[in-house]
Image: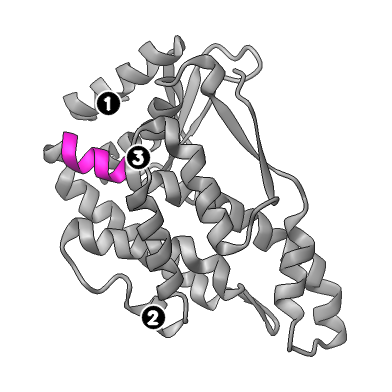
């Protein structure tokens, strides 16, 4: 990958060393994120970093995605786990969506689809933001030369996350408790970048207090990567998502 900074290339090298697999880069204009890492599963010869073509530097996005791999592969093999949905969350989400809200015929038809989509989204956010905050703190502390790009990246993510507050299907909207990881990340971003504006919209949405609770939980749990599952489980309990997922042994 051309034009990456030496410190970013060193992060990629660390992924390769820890995992025993090379990293290849592949442009993908269909990506919603700026970059994502696809693990070398099923005998694939390399991890694939997919990135959305842009003239903007990709260093922060690459470092952030690599952070997940580093936290995983830096653990002993018997402590590496995947995160997989159980399907149990859909029924609970349907209840959250319909409690106290009459639905018309079209909304009843769309309910299952919206609930399944919401459950999938909530599970992704639960894991990615709980661990992602620790990755962002690591980048900030260990790679000060990336802080300017990190601030730009976090600002982009915050603006993107705001769209979730208005995400709807007819009268169906995302249940407030499931927005808590997004609110927690906004609070974290304000603290990391010494701002005070990212979290404001979540106060109006009624989820800021639960976001603060998640941030408090994170502060009480060791930042060592061996405690990542413990933190995700604690967040899930606070939100009401226990049983929505399971941990399964990680395999390449």
Residue 113 is covered by the magenta coloring: no
Q: Nearer the viewer, residue 119 or 62?
A: 119
Report the Cα–Cα distance between label 3 and label 2.
28 Å
Q: Position of residue 121 (x, y in %)?
A: 60, 57
Residue 108 shows in this picture: yes
Q: Nearer the viewer, residue 7 or 195?
A: 195
Q: Nearer the viewer, residue 31 or 110?
A: 110
For label 3, the residue is 222
Where, quadrant-wise, is the C terminus in this rendering?
top right
For label 1, the residue is 2
Q: Nearer the viewer, mark 2 or mark 1?
A: 2
SS type, badge 3 = loop
State which region is magenta.
135-142
Where, quadrant-wise, is the N terminus in this rendering?
top left
Q: Position of residue 95 (x, y in %)?
A: 76, 73
Horizontal arrangement in the rendering, residue 163 relative to residue 242 (left or right):
left
For label 2, the residue is 203
Question: Which of the two discs, 2 and 1, labels the residue nearer the N terminus?
Answer: 1
């Amino acid at each position: 990958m051309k034009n990456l900074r030496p410190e970013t290339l060193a992060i990629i090298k660390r992924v390769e060393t820890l995992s025993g697999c090379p990293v290849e880069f592949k442009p993908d204009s269909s990506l919603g994120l700026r970059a994502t890492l696809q693990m070398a599963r099923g005998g694939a010869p390399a991890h694939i970093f997919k990135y959305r073509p842009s003239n903007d530097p990709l260093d922060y996005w690459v470092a952030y995605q690599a952070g997940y791999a580093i936290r995983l592969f830096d653990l002993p093999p018997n402590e590496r786990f995947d995160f997989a949905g159980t399907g149990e969350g859909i029924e609970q989400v349907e209840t959250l969506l319909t409690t106290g809200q009459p639905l018309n015929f079209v909304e009843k038809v769309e309910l299952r689809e919206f609930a399944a989509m919401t459950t999938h989204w909530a599970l992704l956010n639960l894991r990615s933001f709980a661990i992602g905050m620790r990755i962002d703190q690591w980048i900030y502390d260990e790679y000060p030369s990336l802080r300017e790009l990190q601030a730009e990246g976090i600002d982009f993510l915050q603006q993107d996350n705001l769209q979730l507050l208005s995400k709807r299907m007819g009268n169906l909207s995302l249940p407030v408790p499931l927005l808590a990881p997004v609110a927690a990340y906004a609070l974290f971003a304000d603290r990391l970048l010494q701002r005070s504006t990212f979290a404001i919209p979540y106060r109006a949405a009624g989820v800021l207090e639960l976001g603060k609770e998640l941030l408090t939980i994170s502060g009480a749990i060791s930042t060592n990567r061996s405690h990542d599952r413990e933190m995700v489980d604690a967040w899930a309990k606070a939100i009401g998502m226990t049983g929505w997922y399971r941990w399964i042994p990680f395999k390449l």
